Image (cartoon, rainbow, N blue to C red):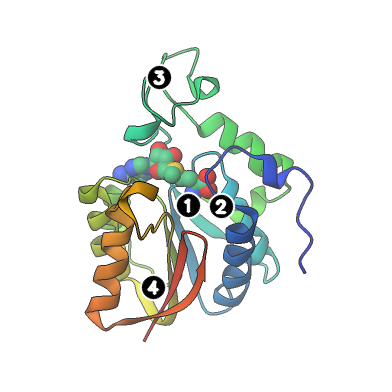
């Protein structure tokens, strides 16, 4: 079993240790094949697991987040965290916490943060990807945009990971599930790994 840095499991975020370990394993595998990209860094928890996998091969993970939080992180919403409100702007801003965490975990040199809206980055992107982890906005519109904009860059035999795929609507929002279903229905992917709400698909 891999050894992870002390404190990683307590970083703010929405990923279980088992899900994190799976991201680590697949990123270790995929970073040998090509570039790795994450959508939705938040405070860096998943990014750090991906970066630790990349580090094994001397590679980097590109991670996209505007750091202004998703709908559910805004003031008054269910997943709002008052610690992430900027004293300068009075608005949610997870970037400082993200930078602190990637430094503390010793993976700053294995991460390329892109602070922007994912659709804007996709419109300028050209590099084929060996792994894409989608964990950005969870509205249907944003999740569909991320799936459509980014899956075209996935190489054959590459991995598409999607977080928060819940079978039952009572367990959580259904947008990640909708893009998971779309990917399977396309016939272009097969299910490779399933851990809690994380699904990892392989591009056929
Ligand atoms: C569920 S959190 C990511 C959690 C993270 N993967 C973890 O392990 O803790 C979703 C993140 O996506 C970002 N986000 C939402 N919509 C976005 C968009 N259209 N472009 C870029 N980032 C976005 C939010 O700012 C938020 O930090």
- Whichever of callouts 3 and 2 sits on the residue coming sooner in the sequence is 2
Quote the CA–CA distance across marks 4 and 3: 35 Å
Quote the CA–CA distance across marks 4 and 2: 21 Å
Give above or below for 195 relative to 43: below
Drawn side of residue 200 relative to residue 20, left or right: left
Mark 4 in CB contact with mark 3 (< 8 angstroms) = no
**Label 3 neighbour load within 10 Å: few <14, some 14-19, many 20+:** some
Q: Which residue is mark 4?
A: 128
Q: Which residue is mark 3?
A: 91
Q: Residue furthest left?
A: 141
Q: Residue furthest bottom?
A: 204
Give above or below for 121 relative to 22: above
Eye-nearest disc, 1 or 4 = 1
Which mark is drawn over residue 63?
A: 1
Expressed as whole percent of the image width and height from the top left, the position of residue 166 reads: 38, 57
Q: How many marks?
A: 4
Expressed as whole percent of the image width and height from the top left, the position of residue 45 reads: 59, 47
Quote the CA–CA distance across marks 1 and 4: 15 Å
Residue appearing at x 29%, y 53% in the figure: 174
Quote the CA–CA distance across marks 3 and 2: 23 Å
**Label 1 neighbour load within 10 Å: few <14, some 14-19, many 20+:** many
Quote the CA–CA distance across marks 1 and 3: 21 Å
Give above or below for 74 relative to 55: above
Ligand 1 within 8 angstroms of badge 2 C-beta:
yes
Drawn side of residue 63 relative to residue 171, left or right: right
Secondary structure under the numbered disc 2 in the rendered image: helix
Ligand 1 placement by image quarter:
top left
Which mark is drawn over residue 46?
A: 2
């Amino acid at each position: 079993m891999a050894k992870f840095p002390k404190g990683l499991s307590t970083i703010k975020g929405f990923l279980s240790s088992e899900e994190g370990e799976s991201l680590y394993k697949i990123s270790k595998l995929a970073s040998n094949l090509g570039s790795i990209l994450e959508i939705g860094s938040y405070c860096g928890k998943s990014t750090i697991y991906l970066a630790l996998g990349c580090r094994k091969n001397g590679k980097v993970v590109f991670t996209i987040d505007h750091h202004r939080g998703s709908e559910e992180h805004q003031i008054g919403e269910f997943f709002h965290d008052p610690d992430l409100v900027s004293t300068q702007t009075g608005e949610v801003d997870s970037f400082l916490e993200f930078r602190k965490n990637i430094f503390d975990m010793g993976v700053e040199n294995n991460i390329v943060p892109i602070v922007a809206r994912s659709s804007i980055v996709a419109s300028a992107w050209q590099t084929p990807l060996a792994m894409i982890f989608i964990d950005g906005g969870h509205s249907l519109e944003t999740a569909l945009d991320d799936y459509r904009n980014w899956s075209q860059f996935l190489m054959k035999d590459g991995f598409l990971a999607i977080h928060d795929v819940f079978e039952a609507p009572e367990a959580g929002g259904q947008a990640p599930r909708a893009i998971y279903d779309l990917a399977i229905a396309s016939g272009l992917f097969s299910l490779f790994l399933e851990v809690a709400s994380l699904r990892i698909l392989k591009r056929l």
